[in-house]
Amino acid sequence: MSPHDFGSRLLLVVSIFCFNGVFGSGRGTKVAAISGLQGIESQKSSLLHHKGRRSGLFDVMSFGARADGQTDDTRAFRAAWKEACKSSGSVHLLIPKGTYLIGPIKFAGPCNNVSSLTFYLKGYLKATTDLSKYGFSAGWIEFRWVDGLTLTGGGTFDGQGAKAWPSNNCPTHSKCILLPTNLKFMAMNKTVVRGITSLNSKFFHMALVGCKNFKGNNINISAPANSPNTDGIHIERSSSVYFSGAHIGTGDDCISIGQGNSQVTISSVICGPGHGISVGSLGRYRNEGDVSGLVVRDCTMTGTSNGIRIKTWANSPGRSAATNMTFENIVMNNVTNPIIIDQAYCPFSSCTSMAPSGVKISDIYFKNIRGTSSSKVAVALECSKGMPCQNIYLEDVHLDLSSGEKHATSTCKNVKAKYIGTQIPPPCT
Ligand SMILES: *[C@@H]1O[C@H](CO)[C@@H](O)[C@H](O)[C@H]1NC(C)=O
Ligand SMILES: *[C@@H]1O[C@H](CO)[C@@H](O)[C@H](O)[C@H]1NC(C)=O
Ligand SMILES: *[C@@H]1O[C@H](CO)[C@@H](O)[C@H](O)[C@H]1NC(C)=O
Ligand SMILES: *[C@@H]1O[C@H](CO)[C@@H](O)[C@H](O)[C@H]1NC(C)=O
Ligand SMILES: *[C@@H]1O[C@H](CO)[C@@H](O)[C@H](O)[C@H]1NC(C)=O
């Protein structure tokens, strides 16, 4: 236990004591105190419910949030959500300015009678650092089964990940403990996330799983370049997803597009540091869905290890397809691998046989990609021997070496790319 841990445990103990102090002391009274508090809460909420019908406003402060950055406010948030979700019409859940210490929490629907639910975060949410409070593979803040959620307000989700990062063994172990993702969206329809910041997540910053019709706009994400698996935005099994206007600097992919996605558009994203915008990794598991209909345009990558990358596992157990993707108007500033298809991905020593990847890559367009590469190979197309890439187009590519030297190069395996317009580096021969 570090002195820091000790400090937060002490705070927790102190706050329990204070809680008992107000309502009496001893076990019995604590139970009574809690049910007493619930009484107060339901009184308040019936007032609010009454008010709610007119204004539809649920303020976490009315549900007992302290916003002192030290008292755990999870219970107040849960109570406010419960009331908001079971009310009707157009509803606002307000988190005013202030710092809130929050443990793992699920904001679950369905909210059947709510036509639109705005989660208005003006405050600064700090994640509890005690890992024992989070469930396996859980998120920190998780939204589930809600139709028509808008998350906005200029506030911040601070995962306080620095203490958790050393216990992440995922970069080196195929079976590992997944630390909590800052913001998880599961099986949501018609979601808007606009004008929020996510900092120092313990793991991924934002993850979308099974979402339909999702719009993200003006989102800032930041974690140190050496923080493990702090992907900015991860998208999986989702469709009709639009992200535009994001600043993402992190220790892993700025955006990763996993299996089972269709109709995903990413535009005006500024990425770096980080590992760039990635499709994949695909093909690790059996029964993965295809990825199709991806557009990435008007993005700038600065000092990232990859620019645009499509990566699929060697030794993949199943068959799937990655098809119909356009990467357009992308500026690379000193990027190590600006354009890279890697179908021999296998970070663990377990893939000794290196059977070719079973993911079929086709109809991929790289258009107007310019800037600088920090490594000599600016365009690397390494496709699967078992499933050669088909219809790979490069149109107007101009990538110089950032050192100012001449002669960036291209490499190709198991692909005959089609070249249109400017080609620097020159095509593979
Ligand atoms: C929705 O509203 C109707 C009528 O106003 C009511 O009967 C029903 O119980 C409400 N459903 C929920 C889940 O609150
Ligand atoms: C989302 O839409 C699908 C149909 O496209 C529906 O089956 C599902 O229940 C909806 N989910 C929510 C949370 O509204
Ligand atoms: C994100 O960062 C940019 C650039 O610093 C800033 O203009 C924008 O207001 C920020 N957005 C949010 C939601 O904080
Ligand atoms: C390719 O993807 C784009 C963007 O999602 C979509 O509009 C288009 O219909 C797709 N084309 C085919 C042939 O599926
Ligand atoms: C380019 O990136 C490399 C590391 O990839 C770094 O050492 C170098 O300083 C960077 N150059 C510029 C001009 O930023």
Image (tube, helix red, strand yellow):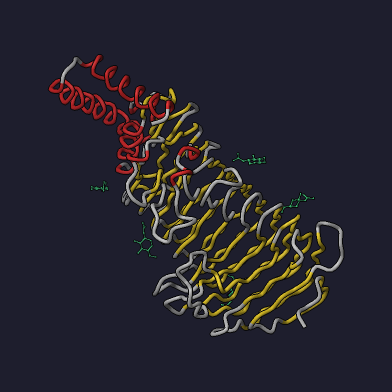
Residue depicted at x 35% and y 45%: 106
Q: Is 84 placed left or right of 160 in the picture? A: left
Which residue occupies the extreme left position in the image? 28
Q: Quadrant of the C terminus?
A: bottom right
Dividing the picture into quadrants, the one containing residue 175 is: bottom left
Residue nearer the viewer, 186 or 131: 131
Q: Is residue 305 above or below residue 29?
A: below
Residue at the image position 74 percent from the left and 58 percent from the top: 332
Query: Percent x, y for residue 180?
Result: 41, 47
Q: Which quadrant of the figure contains the N terminus?
A: top left
Residue at horizontal 50 percent and vertical 27 percent from the top: 97
Q: Is residue 234 above or below residue 349?
A: above
Image location (x, y in percent) of residue 167 = 43, 45
Tell me: 27 left or right of 370: left
| Residue 213 higher or lower than 123, as above or below | below
Residue drawn at 47 percent across, 39 percent down: 159
Q: Nearer the viewer, residue 42 or 364?
A: 364
Question: What number of labels is visible?
Answer: 0
In front of the other: 220 or 312: 312
Task: Find residue 367 and report its horizontal and vertical position in percent.
Answer: 73, 70
Name the spot of residue 385 as percent of width and height, x first: 57, 84
